[in-house]
């Protein structure tokens, strides 16, 4: 009896709650496992705590945590999971204080990251999964990876992991090995990692290199996606290395023969070529004449005669066209093409169709400050300068004589074949009335007319034969005149005396105040007008009398 009590006492001393003990499986039930740990009664463990429940056998030895020696029913409460957790936690703490490296299996996705089983449940933040945080975390569930323990809370039994640190460390080592061994001009394999507007980043097994869009193809590219795609494997050439900043520039086109090497021999100037339009811009059309070689048809080289403002009005992307090589710049990789050169230039024989002196018909296409452009046939314009619109009238703007859309006749007065210009004249349709002006208007004649224009220095009077005369401000009244509009109105009919006829300068001076002068007074006023001389830079009647108004007023008796 004494021996039994000693054994029980010894047993109670060896078994303490919270300790890890060894036990042997006595029975496997539907929901629990009966385990003998050498205590006075057997212990119970839920079957769910065994990962390999199907492989359990009676007699198997297991390590368990003694949770309670006896519950209300006198049963010993054991836990296999808690025993494993404690053992694992001790190992994890030891690993953390060592190199921190541990394997684990991704268990599930939670808010902000993943739960990983490393013997205990650990948290892997989304930012620490990879170098670029993945969008789909579900793809990692069930997979086993290497991790680094970055944080441990012993009190709360929390563990934070990082996979990104290991990847970055591995890439750093690979990057350094790559930089130590690579040379400019080497050809290396890489995988397209990312695309931007200016190029593609290539993963060179740990080292990122930039493949610029200009180094992808000898031809023109609008975007890198036209040439490569993410995940594509490429053979690229190393163009430049910056070991300090760990940057590598790559080229794809350099791995192929430069098609521009023999362009001058294959496409001599004047050669007819065929190609496909790859791009239309406001100033022209780009035409691919072979792989990697494009030429530009400038908008001015599309037609000899048609006024084409935008290439897209007559061409479309993808259209097959024929053109003529106009020029090659091998260094800048540029070829100038022309489409209009496929047809004869109508300006080559322009003087045969439009001889000087020939009378032509046309439509006013446009007005400028200095003249009117007249379309004689499609693409062939002539220009009528304001000075060639009338023999007698001073035209300040062509709209005084013609308007856009008018049908008119004119005479060819000059041809500039080199600059593709034709000068036309309207007044040349009739004889020059100034040749006979002295017979029609004599000094002293009393004439009638209508005020056509008022300026600061005088009034222009339209007389018989569509000839203008000028009444200078000094010739309006015997009294001083400050504002001509106070005395004359446009459209007013007046009677005036001719006091000056200048055939060379093509001007007639009139006087209102001399209408009732005697012959002696008229001679005096004529002498006063003779003193008015236009400057070298003054052209026509208006400028001559403008100068006279500033310097001297002929006939002003107050002076």
Image (cartoon, rainbow, N blue to C red):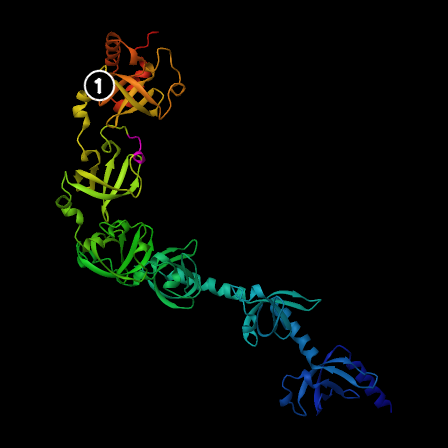
Residue 550 visible in the displayed image: no
Residue 474 visible in the displayed image: yes
Q: Position of residue 212 (x, y in %)?
A: 37, 57
Answer above or below: position of 451 versus 50: above
In the image, farthest residue toward the left: 352
Q: Position of residue 90 (x, y in %)?
A: 66, 72
The foreground one among 215 and 34 is 215
The residue that appears at 36% across and 59% down in the rendered structure is 250
The residue that appears at 21% across and 60% down in the rendered structure is 273
Q: Secondary structure at mark 1?
A: strand
How packed mark 1 is, by other alpha carbons closer than 10 Å (few <14, some 14-19, many 20 or more), is: many
Give the total of numbered labels: 1
The foreground one among 254 and 459 is 459
Answer above or below: position of 7 versus 462: below
Q: Position of residue 291 (x, y in %)?
A: 27, 63
The foreground one among 221 and 154 is 221
Q: Position of residue 348 (x, y in %)?
A: 15, 47
What range of the chain is rendered magenta? 395-400
Tell me the quadrant of the picture where the C terminus can be found.
top left
């Amino acid at each position: 009896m004494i021996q039994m009590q000693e054994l029980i006492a010894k047993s109670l001393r060896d078994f303490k709650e919270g300790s890890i003990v060894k036990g042997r499986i006595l029975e496997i039930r539907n929901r629990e496992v009966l385990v003998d740990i050498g205590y006075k009664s057997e212990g119970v463990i839920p079957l769910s705590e065994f990962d390999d429940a199907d492989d359990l056998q009676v007699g198997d030895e297991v390590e368990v945590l003694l949770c309670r020696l006896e519950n209300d029913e006198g049963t010993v409460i054991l836990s296999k999971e808690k025993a494993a957790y404690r053992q694992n936690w001790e190992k994890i703490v030891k690993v953390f204080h060592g190199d921190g490296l541990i394997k684990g299996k991704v268990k599930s996705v939670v808010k902000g990251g993943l739960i990983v089983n490393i013997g205990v449940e650990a948290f892997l933040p989304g930012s620490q999964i990879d170098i670029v945080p993945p969008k789909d975390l579900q793809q990692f569930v069930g997979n086993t990876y290497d991790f680094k323990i970055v944080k441990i809370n012993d009190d709360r039994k929390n563990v934070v992991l990082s996979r990104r640190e290991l990847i970055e460390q591995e890439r750093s080592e690979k990057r350094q090995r790559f930089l130590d061994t690579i040379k400019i001009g080497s050809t290396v394999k890489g995988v397209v990692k990312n695309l931007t507007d200016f190029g593609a980043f290539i993963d060179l097994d740990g080292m990122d290199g930039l493949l610029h869009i200009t180094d992808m193809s000898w031809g023109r590219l609008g975007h890198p996606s036209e040439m490569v795609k993410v995940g594509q494997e490429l053979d690229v050439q190393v163009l430049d290395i910056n070991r300090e900043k760990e940057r590598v520039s790559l080229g794809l086109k350099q791995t192929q023969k430069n098609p521009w090497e023999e362009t001058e021999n294959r496409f001599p100037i004047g050669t007819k070529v065929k190609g496909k339009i790859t791009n239309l811009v406001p100033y022209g059309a780009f035409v691919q004449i072979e792989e990697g070689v494009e030429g530009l048809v400038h908008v001015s080289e599309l037609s000899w005669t048609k006024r084409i403002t935008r290439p897209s009005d007559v061409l479309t992307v993808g259209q097959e066209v024929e053109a003529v090589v106009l020029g090659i710049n091998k260094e800048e990789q540029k070829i100038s093409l022309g489409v209009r050169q496929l047809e004869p230039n109508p300006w080559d024989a322009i003087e045969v169709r439009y001889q000087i002196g020939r009378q032509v018909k046309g439509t006013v296409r446009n007005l400028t400050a200095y003249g009117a452009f007249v379309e004689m046939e499609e693409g062939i314009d002539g220009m009528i300068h304001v000075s060639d619109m009338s023999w007698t009238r001073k035209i300040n703007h062509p709209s005084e004589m013609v308007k856009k859309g008018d049908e008119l006749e004119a005479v060819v007065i000059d041809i500039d074949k080199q600059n593709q210009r034709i000068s036309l004249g309207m007044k040349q349709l009739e004889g020059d009335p100034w040749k006979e002006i002295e017979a029609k208007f004599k000094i002293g004649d009393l004439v009638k007319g209508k005020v056509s224009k008022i300026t600061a220095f005088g009034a222009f009077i339209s007389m018989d034969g569509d000839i203008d005369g000028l009444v200078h401000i000094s010739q309006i009244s015997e009294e001083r005149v400050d504002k001509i509009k106070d005395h004359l109105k446009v459209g007013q009919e007046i009677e005036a005396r001719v006091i000056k006829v200048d055939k060379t300068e093509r001007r007639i001076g009139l006087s209102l105040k001399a209408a009732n002068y005697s012959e002696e007074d008229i001679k005096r006023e004529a002498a006063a007008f003779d003193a008015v001389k236009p400057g070298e830079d003054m052209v026509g009647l208006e400028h001559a009398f403008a100068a006279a108004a500033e310097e001297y007023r002929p006939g002003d008796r107050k002076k």
